[in-house]
Amino acid sequence: VPSLYLPYQTRSNVNEILQSVKQNNLIYAVLIADKKVVAYVSPKKHLMHPRDLILLINFVDKAKQLRSQETWTPLCLPMFNNTGFLHAYAAFISQHVCLILLSAGEDLEQFHYCSLSKGKIQKELEETRILTEIEMSLSQPVMIPHNCNAAAAIHVLYKCSNSQQYMETGISTHAPLFQTERKRLIRRYAQVQDRAISSTYSQELNE
C-alpha cells in the first residue's frame, strides 16, 4: 500500500487526532491523500488488511461525488468480513485529502456522529498546520535516493512488514544507460519489487 512521506512526529500527531474520535461503533478512521495513505487507526484485534486499504484508495479515487459532498454508503471490506458491510462516511477535508470513517452502525445518528467527528478532525489538522504539511508533501518533487542518504543507490524502496505499506524513491539519473544493462536492471528490479509488494511472499517470509 503506497504511503505519503511525512516526518514520524507528524504522522504520530495525525494518528492521535484520528484516535480522538474513538467510539464503540466506529471501527476504522483513514486519511488518504492522492492515492496514498497518510494514516489510519483500527482496533488491535482487527488491523486493516492491505487489500482493504487498497479498496478504500480506489473507492476515493473513483467516487467523484466525494469532492463536493459528504457520503454515507455501505461498503464491503472482504478481508475484514466478506459476508457483511460497514457503513463508510467519506468527505474531502482539503483539495487532495479525504477522510473515511467506517462504522458498524448504519443509522442516521451514526452519520451525524461521523459528520461532527470530521469537523473536529479537520479543525485540529488545520490549527496544527498538519493539513498544510500534508498538502506541501504532495507538491514536493519525487524523492531521490540521495534524500535517503543513499546517494550511490539507483532506487530505494522501503516496506514496513507490519502495516504492509511502502514508500519508494524515483530512479536516479546515474542509472545505467546502455540498452542491455537497462534491460537487465529493469528485469531484476521487477523481480525485487514483485517480492517486496506481494502479500503471498510476505506471508512466506513470516512463516
Image (spheres, rainbow, N blue to C red):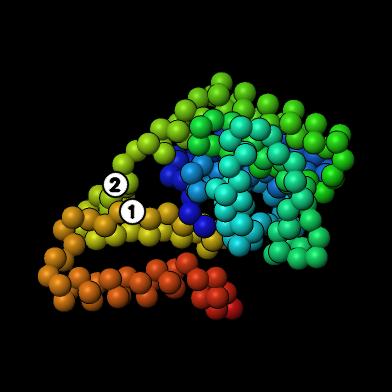
Please tell me whether residue 145 is drawn above or below residue 80 in the rendered image: above
The quarter in which the C terminus is drawn is bottom right
Q: Nearer the viewer, mark 1 or mark 2?
A: 1
Give the image location of residue 105, x and y in percent. Answer: 85, 45
Residue visible at 73% across and 58% down?
Answer: 76
Q: Hey, which residue is sitting farthest front in the picture? A: 65
* Left or right: 146 as drawn, with respect to 64: left
Please tell me whether residue 156 is drawn above or below residue 123 in the rendered image: below
- Is residue 99 at all visible to an observer of this figure? no
Mark 1–mark 2 Cα distance, whole angstroms, equals: 9 Å
The residue identified by callout 2 is 147
Front residue (pair 64, 6): 64
Amino acid tagged 1? Thr
Q: Which mark is residue 169?
A: 1
Amino acid tagged 2? Asn
Residue visible at 12% across and 70% down?
Answer: 178
